Amino acid sequence: QTSETGGYDKRRQTMLKSFEHYVARIQNPPADGCKKDALIREIYAAGLCRETQSLARLEYLGYLDKVLWTRLAEMCGATLSRELTLSIIAVLNETARCGRLSDVLAQLLQSHEPKDRKAESPFGCLFRTACLAAMDRDCALRDLESILQLLVHVYARLEHTPIRRVALRLTSLALWEHLPELRRNHEFREFPQLRQHWQHHIAKKMKRAPPFEANFFPFLIDTITRIVEAQTNEASGEEWSLRCIARFLELCTDLLLQLPTRRFLHLVMVDARILERITMSKRASHKHIAPLLTAFRRAMDFKIVDQTGQVPALDEELAKRRARIYGFQCTCFTAKPDDAYIREIAFIPSAHLASRTTLHEILLRLPDDTLVEVASNALAVLPHDVAASQPQLLVQALLNDLCDRSEMPLEANSVSLYPTEAVLWGEIPHETDWPLALPKLN
């Protein structure tokens, strides 16, 4: 332990000595853009943007305002370097950790806002570059976690118009391009006014290249799915995998608890079955993942009409679930009317099938080919290839879609609006940089 502590102290002293080399250059930055880029690359290569103490000193010296954001404003509309993008993200996350991000962002957005409203703002340029970096399949897990942390901070500050104007594009109606046509048409029947907006969106898409905004969250869900299902033997790789999953759950919970971001994103998450995939994984029981997964499940199952924000009456919600169960029974009978077990399912009372335990037993006894035919082809619960290769995921998806969750209103009412001392001390016995499943008022 002594040798490890001495090695850490030696590395820290070396970093601090190298830091002194940059103090004067940060306080009096070069006017030339190429020299600024060289300074940014040097500081990033020295590891000063990855260590908390050096990040705090960089933030204190005004590195964000004097060097990074100034260079960002100069490069607005062009391709940003990886070092510039990740350096800004690291310093912004450190500023948020210190509780000053709202004031700093307000000052930066006001001082560097373009005069032409049609021109891309520096924040918009940073946001776009960060999202594209996260969509890169070669993006390191450490960088992905940092980008997700920035998105958490961004979507918590939608009161700023420049932020809201950029951030809400990722959660617009364009997300429904990734939904199956059957599910999308069902929503259009429920809310006919959306069909007109959808037709307008398709017409605009045909005239210009599709923006990345429509693909970001579906791509991010696929990335997290790969991380959840991947097996990592290295300890460092496993830690960063867990951190990415935790940040993703924190981000999605925040998005689902705000109606402007929940409106179209919720259905995409339901269709991707990301809740079921994480719940079935071995990482679901990890001490940092389990509380966040519980908060995410509550946000996914929250009883609210996504398009109107209204809370449906309990009997109305119950009637819809009974109708879905009856549709499942009819579909089973239509698929194999001569099967004795299928006929037995068709004549079971719908209220009896609404029990999770009862329905689970029935689904496990159904032949896989019948289950896939009913749930995939008729009910569009999962794509046919996914349903055939992952029957356990199909069963979990059907249980979540069909079973009653009468305890959900009681659970929601029992959760405090703000973190209490008991919640805080239970979640955070010591300082941690992991995301926490704290109750939030939205």
Image (cartoon, helix red, strand yellow):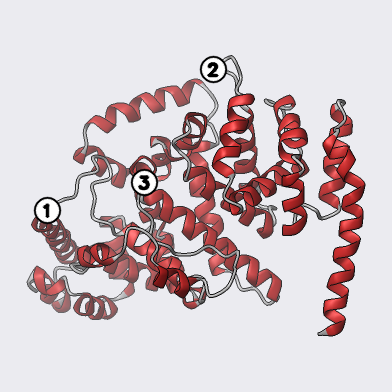
Q: Nearer the viewer, residue 189 or 142?
A: 142
Per the image, label 1 sits on a secondary structure element best described as loop
**Which residue lies under the disc numbered 1?**
313
Could you say which is closer to the camera, residue 124 or residue 61? 61
Q: Nearer the viewer, residue 369 or 255?
A: 255
Instruction: Give the class, few, some or many, for how many residues have Cα within 10 Å of label 1's Cα (few <14, many ≥20).
Output: few
- In the rendering, at what x and y percent does residue 321 appear? 16, 60
Does 164 sit above or below residue 413? above
Residue 296, image x and y in percent? 39, 61
Could you tell me residue 270's position as x and y percent? Answer: 36, 55
Q: Amino acid at mark 2?
A: Arg
Q: Secondary structure at mark 2?
A: loop
Q: Considering depth in this image, is 21 or 78 the residue closer to the camera?
A: 21
Residue in view at x 92 percent, y 56 percent: 17
SS category of the residue bearing label 3: loop
In which quarter of the view is residue 226 placed?
A: bottom right
Q: Residue at x 38, y 36 (%)?
A: 173
**Mark-to-mark CA distance, 3 and 1:** 20 Å
Say whether residue 28 is left or right of residue 293: right
Q: What residue did someone put label 3 on? A: 258
Q: Which residue has dot 2 on it?
A: 117
Quadrant of the rendered structure where residue 176 is? top left
Looking at the picture, which amino acid does disc 3 mark?
Gln
Is residue 124 visible to the viewer in this orientation of the structure? Answer: no
Specify whether 124 is left or right of 401: right
**Real-space Cα separation, disc 2 to disc 3, in angstroms:** 26 Å
